[in-house]
Amino acid sequence: MHIAGSSALVTGGASGLGAGVARHLVTLGASVTIVDVNHEAGAALAKELGAQAQFVAADVADAEQMRSAVEAAAAVGDLRILVCCAGIATAERTLGKDGPLPLERFTRVIAVNLTGTFNAVRLAAAVMAGNTPNDDGERGVVVCTASIAAFEGQIGQAAYSASKAGVAGMTLPLARELARYGIRVVSIAPGTFDTPMLAGLPEAAITALAQQVPFPSRLGRPAEFAALVQHIIENPMLNGTTIRLDGALRMGPR
């Protein structure tokens, strides 16, 4: 899939991995629609990126808000690229000092990370299916964000791990279903990356996380995530799989 001249929608695009992807796709010639709940950061990034970017405020878990975002992305060109980076992380034990984890805190993580991803995919795919196929028969590419926590979730990550395991688990069936339309679906499972999700941790904790990575022994960079997104978009044989991007990290129980 050619990136230049395509319309791309990036959820969670105002910061972290999503912002890295938005910046990279703009440099490659795509028109990028940044979708996020953070109005200030999203608008600022769109202004920074110039005429090739626009910001649409939307909650990925809201059907109508995301429908409007997809329509906005389709209005600036053929929507051929969707990158789902919107997500929230929690670190809460199932049985804490105050008793069982309130159910609504679990369901909110699932709603954003898993249901929100599916919501974006289903709406974008409906538009992509109407595109004129390229020479390889492709009409669109979807890149979702799972996590290595989907496979080695730590204590306190039950909700987060479940949500990301769901993303990894639906990647193949989505790819199989959407193959008839020429739409590929691939997920990335990043390890520990330098994003706002980790920025709130104490410096000592961040250093300890970086040292756990076999090589390179540091946090991943959003630009490295974005580089893999580019390769997935451009390589038509990548489909229906989840790719770990983690420096050989395998997380322990805590």
Image (cartoon, grey):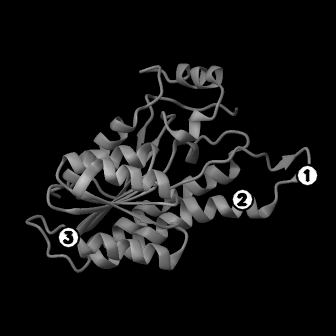
The relative height of residue 213 versus residue 161 in the rendered view (above or below) is: above
Q: Quadrant of the C terminus?
A: top right
Question: Residue, x 66% and y 26% (percent of image)?
Answer: 202
Label 2 Cα crowd, 10 Å radius (few <14 / some 14-19 / many 20+): some
**Residue 73 location (% of width, % of height):** 30, 69
**Residue 169 location (% of width, % of height):** 50, 59
- In this rendering, position of residue 216 left or right of residue 158: left
Badge 1 amino acid: Gly
Callouts 3 and 2 close, C-beta under 8 Å: no
Question: Residue, x 14% and y 55% (percent of image)?
Answer: 4
Question: Residue, x 57% and y 34% (percent of image)?
Answer: 199
Label 3 Cα crowd, 10 Å radius (few <14 / some 14-19 / many 20+): some
Q: Which residue is mark 1?
A: 99
Badge 3 amino acid: Gly
Disc 3 from disc 2: Cα separation:
37 Å
Q: Residue furthest right?
A: 98
The relative height of residue 19 versus residue 208 in the rendered view (above or below) is: below
Q: Which residue is mark 2?
A: 106
The secondary element bearing badge 3 is classed as loop
Callouts 1 and 2 close, C-beta under 8 Å: no
Q: Which residue is mark 3?
A: 77
Disc 1 from disc 2: Cα separation:
14 Å
The secondary element bearing badge 2 is classed as helix
The relative height of residue 198 versus residue 2 in the rendered view (above or below) is: above
**Residue 34 location (% of width, % of height):** 37, 59
Label 1 Cα crowd, 10 Å radius (few <14 / some 14-19 / many 20+): few
Q: Nearer the viewer, residue 72 or 47?
A: 47
Sequence order check, earlier mark of 3 and 1: 3
